[in-house]
Image (spheres, grey):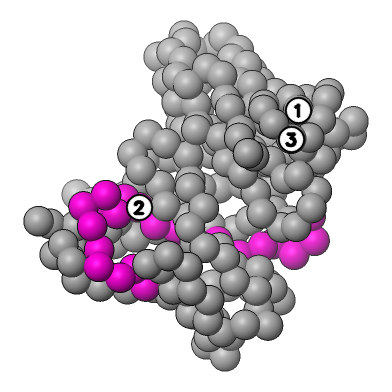
Amino acid sequence: GESVGLHLPTLSVQEGDNSIINCAYSNSASDYFIWYKQESGKGPQFIIDIRSNMDKRQGQRVTVLLNKTVKHLSLQIAATQPGDSAVYFCAENKGSGYALNFGKGTSLLVTP
Amino acid sequence: GAVVSQHPSWVICKSGTSVKIECRSLDFQATTMFWYRQFPKQSLMLMATSNEGSKATYEQGVEKDKFLINHASLTLSTLTVTSAHPEDSSFYICSARTGVGDEQFFGPGTRLTVL
């Protein structure tokens, strides 16, 4: 049978489409949020961050939206490419000390 | 800039032995380093926070006597898994802060397999 926690949510998109990956965070006191991309067997790679005094921030092909009312974070990737296939994690600062609390992760699969 | 390396990238050991993993900041001084553990298909879980020259702060449920952390210099932190057992098999990842801003820079990870 299946074990809880061993299956990441998967988002499958076609190359060229836009992707939206969502994340719910837990700590209402968090003031710094980051999205990371992790390819198999590698460490997390920084994508984009946002502070709690903002609700939107844009980078190259990526946009992060923050809704503090419902404690929700999203990552939008425009014109998704096969190289975007990876697991994406949101992270929030744990408060003092700068340690991060990572979300469960979403596996993004881009099909040609 | 802001490159973090880990050594070894993978290690296989027998049950009961100890394994040391190194985390180095290559082009900056890291005031704080963090150690995370990641099991397959799961998220990163913080194990401990390490400040140079002081004792590490461990997260709840992480045995400090089993996972020894040393942060003797501003560019090197080590994690020693003592008396390793198969359940310690995991992907161990470190990160480092420069002390300016909030961003952490992650290492490439170390795959530990305990037989």
Where is mark 2, residue-wise?
A87
The amino acid type, in three-letter code, at marker 3 is Phe
Q: Chain of mark 3?
A: B
Q: Nearer the viewer, mark 3 or mark 2?
A: 3
Q: Nearer the viewer, residue B60 or A94?
A: A94
Relative placement, left or right, of A87 versus B67 is left
- Judged from the image, the secondary structure of the residue bearing numbered disc 1 is loop
Can the viewer see residue A92?
Answer: yes
Residue found at the very far left of the displayed protein: A112
The number of numbered badges drawn on the structure is: 3
Mark 3 vs mark 2: tell me if same chain: no
Q: Which residue is mark 1?
A: B75
Note whether B21 is above or below B32 in the view shown.
above
Q: Quadrant of the C terminus of chain B?
A: top left
Part of the protein shown in magenta: A75-97
Expressed as whole percent of the image width and height from the top left, the position of residue B54 reads 89, 34
Residue A14 point in image, percent of width and height: 13, 64
Using the numbered discs, state the Cα–Cα distance from disc 3 to disc 2 in whole angstroms: 28 Å
Q: Chain of mark 1?
A: B
Q: Secondary structure at mark 2?
A: strand
Q: Is residue B107 left or right of residue A10?
A: right
Crowding at label 2, few (<14), some or many (≥20) Cα neighbours within 10 Å? many
Residue at 50%, 31% in the rendered image: B109
Query: Could you tell me if the residues under marks 3 and 2 are in contact, i.e. CB atoms within 8 Å?
Result: no
In magenta segment, residue A74: no
Residue A29 sits above or below residue B7 on the image = below
> What is the spatial separation of the Cα atoms under label 3 and label 1, in whole angstroms?
7 Å
Q: Which residue is mark 3?
A: B28
Which amino acid, by three-letter code, is at mark 1? Thr
Residue B60 position within the rendered picture, expressed as x and y whole percent measured from the top left: 69, 48
Q: Is residue A54 left or right of residue B87?
A: right
